[in-house]
Amino acid sequence: MSDKKFASQADLAEKKVSFDQLSEHAYAYTAEGDPNTGVVVGDDGVMVIDAQATPVMAQDVLRHVRSVTDKPVKYVTLSHYHAVRVLGAAGYRAEHIIASRDTYDLIVERGEADMKSEIERFPRLFRAVESVPGLTWPSIVFERRMTLWMGELRVEILQLGRGHTKGDTVVWLPQDRVLFSGDLVEYGATPYTGDAYLTDWPATLDAVAALRPAKLVPGRGVALQTPEDVQAGIEGTRAFISDMFESVKSGVTAGHDLRTVYRDTYAELAPKYGHWVIFDHCLPFDVSRAYDECTGHRDPRIWTAQRDKEMWDALEA
Ligand SMILES: [Zn+2]
């Protein structure tokens, strides 16, 4: 493992974009495991869910939106605070940027550190990084839930619980039964848990499943277009989290250090999940957070560009 390039620095091949219509109002912009963007077309305008990494990359989303509607983009909703999904927000010139109070708090507390850390991790995903004007700040901050009517279309913006981050937000179209889950659910892509609440995440997935979505746009991976595929996405995410966290817990219980726990967990998970995109990128961060959660760090510690590299060298050298 010593030849592994840091995070996603070796991942330079462009992905193919798909733009799928899921219902009368819902579309999914996906790219073979890169971060997804959701699109809701209401009567009076458009909502974009997760912005892409830079305003220049947002232009490609807008080009696809313009292939189906001329309505203005009124809202950008942030599923959570991660830079790779939010720093493109300025590119839409939306009237409002919507985020949960917990997401807002995370931007205040660690947005700057996260921006520097993520730009180092994913050079390909920050195309034209110089177009980023700075941190993305919401103009509407809600607590727990808000309902928005885009004309006749009811849009529920919900915090169902902590999981991928403490601020996780989903967008739910009850009439169309379409859910945009952000990184709470992944499909064919490794869940990143470096900022997660692993003890809470399964109950939040229960709340996602309880909505009984007919279709679901995960944070990464193809749009899930049948109830069976939706369930496979939710249960695959749950299985990864549970297998990873259990492996780390048993290593901690046995008194092993982080490096040993990482090696054992990698060996245990690779046969089952090693083919999911960004597996090698995520696992050192995932195990580090799981180890912290098992050893008394209730909240995730802030990742900085420097902490990223130190952790990587300690686990992969
Ligand atoms: Zn994320």
Image (spheres, helix red, strand yellow):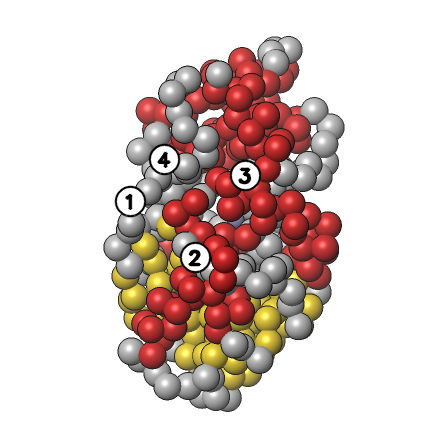
Query: What is the C-alpha distance between the residues marked 3 and 4?
Result: 21 Å
Q: Which amino acid type is shown beneath numbered disc 3?
A: Thr
Please name the residue shown 35% across and 48% down the image: 33
Location of mark 2 (residue): 128
Query: What is the C-alpha distance between the residues marked 4 and 2?
Result: 18 Å
Q: Which label was assigned to residue 13?
A: 1
Indicate the secondary structure of the residue bearing disc 2.
loop
Q: Which amino acid type is shown beneath numbered disc 1?
A: Ala
Please name the residue shown 31% across and 33% down the image: 275
Q: Nearer the viewer, mark 2 or mark 3?
A: 2
Q: Which amino acid type is shown beneath numbered disc 4?
A: Ala
Q: Which of marks 3 and 1 precedes in the sequence? A: 1
Mark 4 CB lies closer than 8 A to ligand 1: no
Location of mark 4 (residue): 10
Q: Which amino acid type is shown beneath numbered disc 2?
A: Ala
Where residue 182 sits in the image (x, y, percent)?
49, 56
Name the one closer to the observer, 189 or 120.
120
Around disc 4, counting alpha carbons within 10 Å, would you say few (fewer than 14), some (14 to 19), or many (20 or more)? some
Query: What is the C-alpha distance between the residues marked 1 and 3?
Result: 24 Å
Q: Nearer the viewer, mark 1 or mark 3?
A: 1
Where residue 273 sits in the image (x, y, percent)?
36, 32
